[in-house]
Image (cartoon, rainbow, N blue to C red):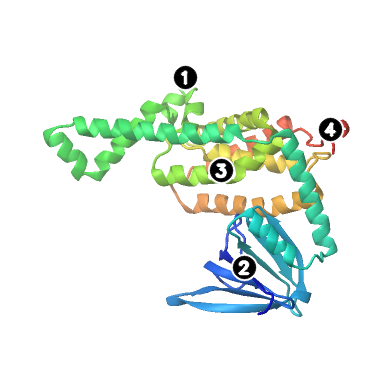
Amino acid sequence: MAGAHVFEVRFYMAGSNWPSNPFQFRGNGTIEVGADFVTVRGSRHRSFRLPQRQEQRLRMVDIVNAYASGSDVWFDVLGVKEDLTVGFSAPDAATADRIVALLPKRQTASFAEAHAENEVFHDRIDYWTPSTPVIWGLLVANIGIFFLMWLARQRYQAALEGPLRQLFEIRPNVASIMEAQQLVEWGSNFGRRTLRGEWWRLFTAMFLHGGILHLGFNMLALWQVGRLTERIFGSVRFAGLYLLSGLAGSLASVLWNPQVNSVGASGAIFGIIGGLLAFLGRENSGVPPTVVKELRASLLPFLLFSLWMGFIYPHTDNAAHIGGLVGGWLAGHLLARSIHVPEHRQG
C-alpha cells in the first residue's frame, strides 16, 4: 500500500495487565496504517490446531479513542452491531506514540471524560507517592524468608545419614511433617502456641509460606493490587494497612480454628483489597468517579472469585481471608487520606 506505515507489534489474548484484541491474535504480528485502512496481521490460536495467520482490515473512519500508555496502544472501532477495542504492544514507547499519531484523533464523549479523569488521578498519585518502596520491601521479605527456610531444610536433609535420610526421601508424609514442624519453629500461627501466650505468631505467620506455589500466587496478587494501593494511601499508611490487615486475618484464623497451622500473606492481601474499597467509597477521596468505577469493576470479581475458591478447596484458610478483608476495610477508613493536590502546587 503506497504511503502505508508498517510496525512490528505483539498481541495478547487476555489479561487485565495486557492490551487484548478481539481477533484472538497472540504473539508477534504487524499493524499497517494507510490513508483509508488499518490492517492488523497476526496469528490466531485455535484449540488443538496450529495457529493460523490472519489479517483484519479496519476503516480509518471507524477508528476512535486511540491512545498509548508506555509501549501499549489501544483504539476503538465503531461497528454496526458492536464496537471493538483493539490493543497491542509496540517495541517501545516512542513507536507507540508514532502509531497513535497516525490514527484518527476523534474521541467519544465518554472516552474523553474517562481519559481526562485518569490523567488527573495519575497526576495526583504521582504527586503524593511517586514510588512504592513498601511493596518492594514486602516482596523481598517474603521471598527471602522462604529461601532461608528452604536453605535450612536442605542443610538438615544433607546432615541426615543412613536409615533416617532414606526414610525422609522415601516417605513423602515424613517430609510434610518435617516441613510443618519447621513452619511452627519459624513462627506459624499455630493455635496451641498462639493462644498460650505466643501472640507474636500473629505477625510472623504473615511472612511464611507453605510452598513455592503458595508463595508465587500470593506475591503475584500482592504485586498487582499493592502497587496502586500504596500510591493511593502513601507508603507509611500502606504499611499500616498491610500489618493491621494481616494481624486481623491471623486473629480470625486462630479463633475460628485453633488446630490450623496457618501461614501466608493472603489475609493481608485481602485486607489491602478491603482497604482500597473503603478508600474508594469515601467522599472527597480525590479519586475521580470514572476511576472509582473502573477499580471497583476489576476488584469485586477478583474478590468474589477468590472467596468462592476458598470455600471450594478444603485446605484454604478462608477465615484468614475474611478476617483480613474486614480488618482491611476498617483500617482503610482509619488510614484514608485525600489525594487532592494543594492548589498552590497544581500545574
Image coordinates of residue 308 in percent, x first then y, are 55, 53
Write down the quadrant of residue 21 in the picture. Answer: bottom right
The residue tagged 3 is 223
Q: Could you tell which of marks 3 and 2 lies nearer the N-terminus?
A: 2
Q: CA distance from mark 3 to mark 2?
A: 24 Å
Task: Give, as a three-letter code, the residue at label 4.
Answer: Arg
Write down the quadrant of residue 297 in the picture. Answer: bottom right
Task: Give, as a three-letter code, the residue at label 1.
Answer: Gly
Q: CA distance from mark 4 to mark 2?
A: 39 Å
Label 3 Cα neighbours within 10 Å, binned few <14 / some 14-19 / many ≥20: some
Q: Can the viewer see residue 26 in this picture?
A: no
Which quadrant of the figure contains the N terminus?
Answer: bottom right
Residue 21, numbered label: 2
Image coordinates of residue 157 in percent, x first then y, are 23, 34
Element type at mark 2: loop
Task: Give, as a three-letter code, the residue at label 2.
Answer: Asn
Extreme residue in the top direction: 197
Contact between labelled residues 2 and 3, with CB atoms less than 8 Å apart: no
The residue tagged 4 is 345
Q: CA distance from mark 1 to mark 3?
A: 33 Å
The residue tagged 1 is 197
